[in-house]
Amino acid sequence: EIVLTQSPASLSVSPGEGATLSCGASQGISTNLAWYQKKGGQAPRLLIYGAFTRATGIPARFSGSGSETEFTLTISSLQSEDSAVYYCQQYHNWPWTFGQGTKVQIK
Amino acid sequence: QVQLQESGPGLVKPSDTLSLTCTVSGYSISSNNWWAWIRQSPGKGLEWIGYIYYDESVNYDGSTYYNPSLKGRVTMSVDTSKNQFSLRLSSVTAVDTAVYYCAGFDSRGYYGIYWGQGTLVTVSS
């Protein structure tokens, strides 16, 4: 089973600043990685798939990069509504697995 | 607007079977192939339970792909007449206490596009 390790576990950012979230895979997964945003009691929302392709309706301030074992989700110019937990998920080897999440708080 | 809603008992006794249903609205369950269940235990990350592949065009009632870690306790099914799909998890213990999410995945079953808000199931006597 592929293990995804996300860092940092949490971060606090001022509005307008940027944030960089990392996701490391225990083995190479090409670009078979997705990112989700989850707020409180809401359903997860797909942000990125294929490591860098934004899902429908996702603002351009969200961008993904990386391949094989190192991936990054960058949120530029953070807004208050970006406060959430962000998860990565690999779909390279079954069973698909998720990272433990990074909690982003807006100061 | 596509919406998924989980339903089922919020409390299940140890050794019993957990049963949940996901009702899909705004989208025909026959139009997509991959329907999934995922859970999140308290204070932990997301865990894949499995998904079911359904293809009405070939009258195919579904292949299932379950997480091996659940050791044969999982059963999933689709009911197109009700636009629902279901999860059954047998022989539950306290470690099965979690928020359970249903989701609709992309055409290749890689990532979740449509998600329910989740339902908390507690395993306790």
Image (cartoon, rainbow, N blue to C red):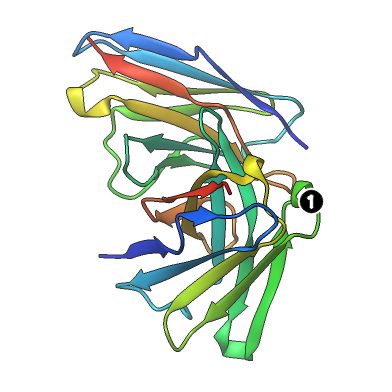
The subunit carrying tag 1 is: B
Q: Is residue B105 or residue B50 the one in the foreground?
A: B50
Which quadrant would residue A81 be assigned to in this image?
top left
Provide the residue designation for mark 1.
B68
Quadrant of the rendered image containing residue B58:
bottom right
The one of B94 and A18 positioned closer to us in this rendering: B94
At 30% from the left edge and 16% from the top edge, which residue is drawn? A105
Left or right: residue B18 versus residue A72 is right
Count how many numbered circles sit on residues in the image: 1
Above or below, comparing residue A77 to residue A60 in the picture:
above
Looking at the picture, how far across and down is residue A100, in whole percent?
A: 56, 27
Taking depth in this image into account, of B31 and B89 the one nearest to the observer is: B89
In the picture, measured across the screen, residue A4 lies left or right of residue A50, that is: right
Per the image, label 1 sits on a secondary structure element best described as: helix
In the picture, the quarter occupied by the N terminus of chain A is top right
The residue that appears at 32% across and 35% down in the rendered structure is A39
Pinpoint residue A52: horizontal percent, then vertical percent: 48, 35
Vertical order, A61 against B16 (above or below) = above
Q: Is residue B32 visible?
A: no
Screen quadrant of the C terminus of chain A: top left
What's under tag 1, amino acid-wise?
Pro
The reply to whether residue A56 is visible in this rendering is yes
Left or right relative to A12: residue B121: right
Residue B109 drawn at (x, y percent): 59, 59
- In the picture, residue B88 is in which quadrant? bottom right
Residue located at (46% from left, 18% from top):
A21
Taking the image as shown, residue A9 lies to the left or right of residue A56, namely right
